[in-house]
Every structure is written in structure tokens, then in C-alpha cells.
Image (cartoon, helix red, strand yellow):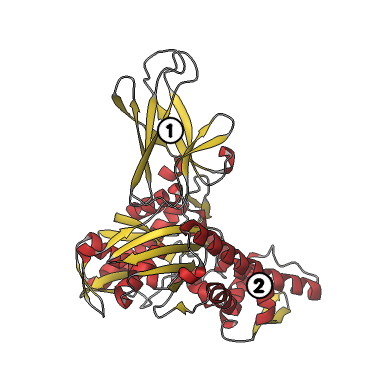
Amino acid sequence: MAIIELGEPKVITNSEGKRLTPSVVGFSKKNELLVGDLAKRQMVSNPENTVHSIKRHMGKPDYRVTLNNEKFTPHGISAKILQKLKHDAEKYLGDAVEKAVITVPAYFNDSQRFATKKAGELAGLEVLRVINEPTAAALAYGLRDGINNRKIMVYDFGGGTFDVSILKIKDGIFEVLATSGDTELGGDDFDMRIVEHLLARFQEAEGKNLSDIPQAMQRIREAAERCKIDLSTLETANVNLPYIFENKNLDIDITREQFNKMTEDFVKKTISIIEKTLQDARLSPSEIDEVIFVGGSTRIPAVVKAVEGFMGKKALQNINPDEVVAMGASVQAGILGNDYLKSPREEVDSGNLVLLDVTSLTLGFETVGDLMAPIIPKNTTIPTRNSKTFTTHYDNQRVVRGKILQGEERAASKNVTLGTLVLDNIPPSPKGIPRIEVTFDIDANGIINATAKDLGTGIMRSVTIERPQGLND
């Protein structure tokens, strides 16, 4: 978390005195709520009452996690993390914190953004803006290093998600040209490849499958993460877990070369996403002036080598990749609050800083034959709105109902259903006669609203986007 202090973004510490708060929530054996480091410490001793990486499940209305015999939604868990951050910020500042800018992966869909905003509200915050993580990073670099008149690529590889964004920065305007990503690719997947390797080796040696023993699995997951981190600086890392099962020990060396082979498909996938994003921006690697690394997974040597090799230039890493997004969010908050901002190179009038972000996924609606009719194409600058006209399918039809979709597939069923559009009280008439103009509006948070107008009568009617029930819990 970060604030603007004396015109500059500043990362502030939590109540444990640390600059990073793990996204882990749990209940102790005494039924106490634990968030952050306290929850992470009990992941081995109390795994059934501890949850991590909830970000991957945001926006899934039917997903629940059970802690302490109580079921929680993903945004409910996220709210507990945000409540801690709010409390810790208030303790640090000695003042109430009521408003915040929250960042999300650029490839989050509407349901995921809506759930994130909901989590902030449940935590007692007025969410001023939900912005994309790569865009936030660009804001932080733009303010600090005076990057101007440049085209930049932000490569954001965190623990749970991956994004690439291409931006043009000119005269204080941060314009996103294209963005793409994978909300289910991150450092956690690298950890799991090590976990799978360790499980296979132990089963070969001892004939025991440890995957159905929760405490053993949690010890192995933690060891895998440490191994991954060690291999960023060492050629060989040792995993040593005494008494992992009865009197058996797990003691295995893993080389960086082995790790690279285990995970090379993940690295190649990120490069293919870079290629796609550059194509969408109609740019070549040589036309990109700067590459910015964001997220802890950018410390993996194979990742650095692959990206710098493909782009033909060294990446900027002079701001901590774990902190740069929070710093950028504070800059956005400063812009929204018209605060005084300054750069080491020059004084900056926050009123002259403009952020032009884009929608990362195409928005459309379902038509006959399981097809999606696009309304707002991906990489359209937001906020934006667009309209399409449709009609009734049978005589005297009083209600029109259809799915609102996000995605790039032609088949409607292969895209994400955000909710249902419902328009009622249509005047009775023969089929095909009513002309109903539906307008989709994407706000600056990337969240969708809708209105409708009967073009025959000129009457405006409200349209309800019926979000899945789980997102309103």
C-alpha cells in the first residue's frame, strides 16, 4: 500500500513493520481471524483453515471457501485483506482512511472488477477508481523517472496472474494502446511444477503419495516457493524436509536448468502474449522504447532472459517490482484528488496528468445460433459507450432477455457471461417491429452499465444487468 507524501508516492508499512502483506487469510485454532503474515505462519499447522491466492477466484459467483466451518465468497476474503490494510494505514497515518484506489490485473473481466470494488466497499472504503496494474506501474515510472514521449511495454508477472500492456506517454498523457494477459498464470504455477517434481521423486524413492496429506503438502508448497526464490540467485537449491511422512525425509536437489525445463512452457506462453499485444498495438519490438518489469516472477532468470531477448533491450527494474503498482495507485489517487505531485526531474501539475486506459476484452451480447455480436471491441479507450439495435422474436413480446458477454470467441457459449440483460414493458406489437436500442457503458473502472431506448416511442427505460447472486452476497 502506498500514499502521496510531500508530492511523491511512498510505500508505507503494515502493523508488523513490513512493506508487503501476504494475501493470506485464516482462522487460528482459537477462532481468531488472521490476515497476512500471521495467517501465512499457520499454513502448515492449520492448512484447512487458511486460504491464499484468492485473487484467481474473484468474480466466480459459485465459488466458496470454508474457514472455521463458515463459507466465504472470494470478495468476502479479499475484503478481510483490505480491512487489514485500511486499519494498518490508519495506524501509520494517525488518521481515518475512507477512500482508496485499488488495482487489478489488466485482463480482469467485468465480474472480477465488480467483485474487487465490492470487496473494497465491504472493507469500509469508497473505491475512487479500479485501475489496471500495468497502467499503475507506468504511472509510477512516469512520475519518478520522467519517462516522456516514449512507447513502453509493461510486463507484469505476479504470483497469480500475468498481464502485458503497451502504452504511449506524451505530454503527461498515459495512453494504453493494447493489453492482454492470463488471469490463471503466475508464480504459483512455477511453484506447483516444483511441487509435482518433489512428489514424484518421493514416491519413486519411498512408494508413498504425499498429495493426500494436507500438512505434508503445505510444507512441500512452502519449500517449493523457497526453492524457486533460491534458484533466482543460485544454480542449485536444496529441499530438505525432515519427517515429511512418518520417519521418512524428503531431501532433493534441484538445479536451475531442471527448473527452467519444468517451467519453459509458462515462459513461452508469456512471450506469445507479448507478440499478440504488440500486434494489437500495431508495433514491433524495436518500436518499444522501454520495458518495465512488474511482479515478483520477473526475478526468475529465465523470464528475464526470454523477455529481454525477444524485445532486444534491457528491462527497467529501478523501482521494486513488488511495490511499483501500489506506488502507481497512489499517483492515480493524487491525480483524482488534484494533489500536488512532483518528479525528481520536474514539478508536475496533477491536473495535466491524464490516464487513458482500455477495456481488455470485447463486450457483446448473445444472438441466435450461439453467436456473440460485439458491441465494444477490446482495447477501446475507457470510459466509453456504444449502442446496437435489436427487436422482438414473436408477436406481442413484452420482455426481452439476453446474455451480456465478454471475450474474443465467436461462439457465445465460449465467452464469459457477465449477467443477463432484461428489458420489460415493451408495448404489444407484431414481431420485428419494435426497435430497441441497447447502450453499453464502460466506466473508468472498467465496470459495465446498460440503458435502453424504444426508438419507436422515444421512451427511455432502465435495463437491469442481473449479476449472478454470488457477486451480491
- For discs 1 and 2, the disc positioned in front in the rendered view: 1
Q: Residue at x 46, y 34 (%)?
A: 420
| Amino acid type, residue under disc 1 in the picture | Leu
Point 57% across, 44% down: residue: 409
Q: Secondary structure at mark 2?
A: helix
| Relative depth, front residue between 117 and 81 | 117
For residue 330, what is the image quadrant?
bottom left
Q: Would you call the spot at circle 2 few (<14 residues within 10 Å), some (14-19), or many (20 or more)? A: many
Q: Is residue 333 above or below residue 407?
A: below
**How busy is the neighbourhood of tag 1: few (under 14 within 10 Å), some, or many (20 plus)?**
some
Which is more N-terminal, label 2 or label 1?
Answer: 2
Residue 417's spot in the image, x, y percent?
51, 41
Q: Are marks 1 and 2 in contact (CB under 8 Å)?
A: no
Q: Is residue 133 above or below residue 300?
A: above
Front in this rendered view, residue 248 or 92: 92
Question: Which residue position holds label 2?
Answer: 194
Q: Position of residue 126 (x, y in %)?
A: 28, 54
x and y percentages locating residue 291 in the rendered image: 45, 73
Spot occupied by residue 264 in the image (x, y as percentages of width and height): 65, 70
Q: What mark, if any, has residue 421 been given in the picture?
A: 1
Q: At 37% across and 29% down in the image, what residue appears?
A: 437
Q: Is residue 328 above or below residue 78?
A: below
What is the number of the mark on residue 291?
Answer: none
As helix, strand or loop, the secondary structure at mark 1 comes to strand
The kind of residue on which mark 2 rests is Ile
Q: Distance of mark 1 from mark 2, alpha carbons? A: 45 Å
